[in-house]
Image (cartoon, rainbow, N blue to C red):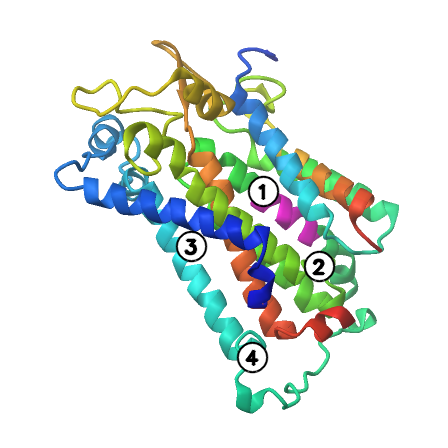
Amino acid sequence: MEMKELRGSRGVLAAVALLIIFIGVTVAFVQLNGNVARGISPEYNRLAHLQQPNSLSAWVYDWRGFDTLIETGVIYVGAVVSVLVIGRGLVRMKQVEGEEPVPQTSLDLKIGSVNAILKYFIFPLVILLAAYGILIVTGAATSGGGGFQCGVVVASAYLIGAVFFGKKNPLNFRRKFLIAIGSFGWALYALLGLPGYLVTGYWQYNVGTDLWSSIAGFPAQIPSILHTIFGDPYRLALVLKGGTFYSTAGIVPLINIGEAFNVIGAICLIFLVFIYGWSDTEEAKA
Amino acid sequence: MVMLFPMMGGEITPIVVGFAIGFLFGTQVYSNVSRRTVVMIICLCIVGASLFQAPVFTWSLIGGYITDGLSFAAPFISATIGILLGWAVRGGK
C-alpha cells in the first residue's frame, strides 16, 4: 500500500480510529493506579478446582484483552518482517528501485502427478478445514478461546491448498482480501473496547456479561441496552439440577471473531509473501 | 427426547455467524470440481459435525442437540454450506 492511498476519507477514518484507541487505552492505563480488579480467577478456581483445575483458562479469563493483544502483536510483527525481508516491494529503497525483482520459479504442480487419493480429497479437505476453523471461533462462547486457533486452522487450509495446487489454490485469498479482513479484525477488536470504556472507564470492560457492576465501589451501572446488544446474542441456558441458569460470554465471542480475522489476514499474508512475494504483477498472473 | 426449547441466542448466533463467515470465505474459492465432490463434502461435513457434537450447553434441535450422546455441531454444517454457497454465488472456476 502506498501512502497516497491513505489520503482522503480512508486516512481520516484511520486517524480518528487510532486517536480514539490511543486516548482510551492511555486513560485506562492512567486510571489503573490502585484500581486493578482482582479478576474472575478466584471464583473460577473455587468453583472448578475439582473438575478442571485449568490455571491457563483462569489467566485467559482475567486478562483476555492483553492475551489477544499480545497474540495479535506477535503475528503482525511476523507478517511485517516477512513482507520486509521477502516481499521487498513494501519498502522501496532508492538504490534497488531500478533492479528487477528476484526471479521466482513457478510453484504450479501438475495435478496429474499428485496421488489420485490426494487429488480427490485435498479440495474437500481444504473446504472442511476452513469450516472447522469457523466452528472453533463460533464456539468461543463456550470455551476460553477460539480466535487465534481459528486463524491458524484456516491458514493451514490455505497453505495445504497452496502446497498441492500452487497458484491454482482453491482457497485463493488475494492480498487485498487478506489486508481487508486483517484490518477489519483489528478495528473490531480495538473498538469493542469503546462501549466499556465510555460507561465504566475500563477499556474493553465486558458490558455484555457485566460481572462487576453489582460490586460496591464499581464506577458505573451498565445500561440494559448494552446487556441486550452485547449479551443476549450469546446467552445460553444452563439446565442443571439446581435449576435453569442463564449465562453469556458477552463481547468475548466478538473479540474472538476480530482476533480470528486478524490472524487469518496476518498468517495467510506471510504465506502469500513466501509464495508470491509482494509483487502486484506476480499476483495478477496467478 | 428432541427439544426445540429452551432455545437461546447463544445456540442460534454461532450458526448465523458461521454461515456469514463461511460465505465470505466461499467468495474466495476458485475451483472446478464435479457435483459428486460437492456431495462428498456435504456428507463428510455431516459426519464431522456428528463427531464434533454440539456444545454441552446446547439444548435445542436447532442448536444441534438431538439426544444424549447424539448431537451435531450446527455451526460446522452452516459454515460448510456458507462456503459452498459463497463459492457458487461469488466464487470462480
Residue A252 visible in the picture: yes
> In the rendered image, which quarter is residue B65 located in?
top right
- Quadrant, the C terminus of chain A: bottom right
Label 1: which secondary element: helix
| A276 shown above or below B2 | below
Label 1 marks a residue whose chain is A
Residue B14 in percent (x, y) is at 56, 31
Give me the C-alpha separation between circle 2 and circle 3: 23 Å
Task: Estimate how packed mark 2 is, as few (under 14), some (14 to 19) or many (20 or more) residues with alpha carbons within 10 Å.
Answer: many
Give the mark, 2 or 3, whose residue is nearer the N terminus: 3
Label 2 marks a residue whose chain is A
Task: Estimate how packed mark 4 is, as few (under 14), some (14 to 19) or many (20 or more) residues with alpha carbons within 10 Å.
Answer: some
In this rendered view, identify the residue nearer to me: A224 or A94.
A94
Circle on res. B3: none
Label 3 marks a residue whose chain is A
Give the mark, 2 or 4, whose residue is nearer the N terminus: 4
Circle on res. A88: 4
Q: What span is colored magenta in the figure?
A: A125-133
Residue B73 visible in the picture: no
Q: Residues at marks 2 and 3, common chain?
A: yes
Circle on res. A134: 1
| A205 shown above or below A247 | below
Give the mark, 3 or 4, whose residue is nearer the N terminus: 3
Q: Which residue is mark 2?
A: A172
- Viewer-nearest of discs 2 and 1: 2
